[in-house]
């Protein structure tokens, strides 16, 4: 896979609903990837989190789950990385540090694929379990 970055669920939501919440570096990287037609990736876990975003306390958006999933389905250059046994094992090892199952799976996906994670999640950033772009 040619992608070097994995988008956390919060980055996907902010890209669609509130781009001002992205850091300057995050926005620049996403804009460059779009302009150059480079691949970016999300975890299969992100699709699951987006499917249940309606009413979420953590990810507030004016868009419905269906709108966001439609956007994702039409996003050029987006690769969805499935949850494999290797990723699940890595996620289980991260549980004591990251606590939230979704965070564990997304961080594990980045680790297994050797990707940098674009995230605003301070727990993931502070943990240093994966290379992040804040």
Image (cartoon, rainbow, N blue to C red):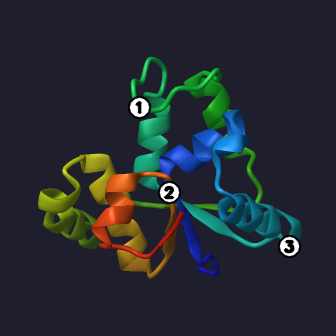
Tell me the residue at 19%/50% (across/down): 99
Give the residue displayed 48% in from the left and 44% down from the top. 47
**125 sits left or right of 117 in the view:** left
Mark 1 or 2, nearer chain start: 1
Of all residues, the one furthest to the left in this rendering is: 96
Please name which of the two marks, 3 or 1, marks the residue nearer to the observer: 1
Asked if labels 2 and 3 touch by Cβ distance under 8 angstroms, the answer is no
Q: Which residue is mark 3?
A: 36
Image quadrant for the C terminus? bottom right
How many numbered discs sit on the rendered protein?
3
Q: Residues within 10 Å of mark 2 (few under 14, many from 20)?
A: many
Nearer to the camera, 72 or 128: 128
Disc 1 element: loop
Query: SS at mark 3?
Result: helix
Q: Is residue 94 visible?
A: yes
Front one among 7 and 18? 18
Q: Residue 25, labelled with which disc?
A: none
Relative side of 72 to 119, left or right = right
How far separated are the C-alphas under marks 3 and 1? 32 Å
Inter-mark Cα distance, 3 to 2: 21 Å
Q: Is residue 84 visible?
A: no
Residue pointed to by mark 2: 119
- Mark 3 is surrounded, within 10 Å at the Cα level, by few (under 14), some (14 to 19) or many (20 or more) other residues, namely few
| Residue 107, quarter of picture | bottom left
Q: Is residue 54 above or below residue 110?
A: above
The residue that mark 1 highlights is: 58
């Amino acid at each position: 896979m040619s992608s070097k970055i994995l988008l956390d669920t919060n980055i996907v939501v902010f890209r669609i609903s509130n781009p001002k919440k992205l850091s300057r570096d995050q926005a620049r990287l996403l804009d460059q990837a779009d302009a150059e037609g480079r691949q970016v990736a999300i975890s299969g876990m992100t699709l699951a989190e987006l499917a249940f975003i309606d009413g979420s306390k953590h990810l507030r958006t004016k868009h419905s789950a269906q709108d966001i999933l439609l956007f994702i389905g039409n996003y050029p250059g987006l690769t969805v990385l499935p949850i494999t046994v290797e990723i699940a094992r890595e996620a289980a090892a991260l549980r004591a540090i990251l606590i939230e199952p979704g965070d564990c799976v997304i961080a594990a996906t980045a680790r297994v694929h050797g990707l940098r994670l674009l995230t605003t999640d301070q727990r993931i950033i502070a943990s240093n379990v994966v290379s992040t772009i804040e």
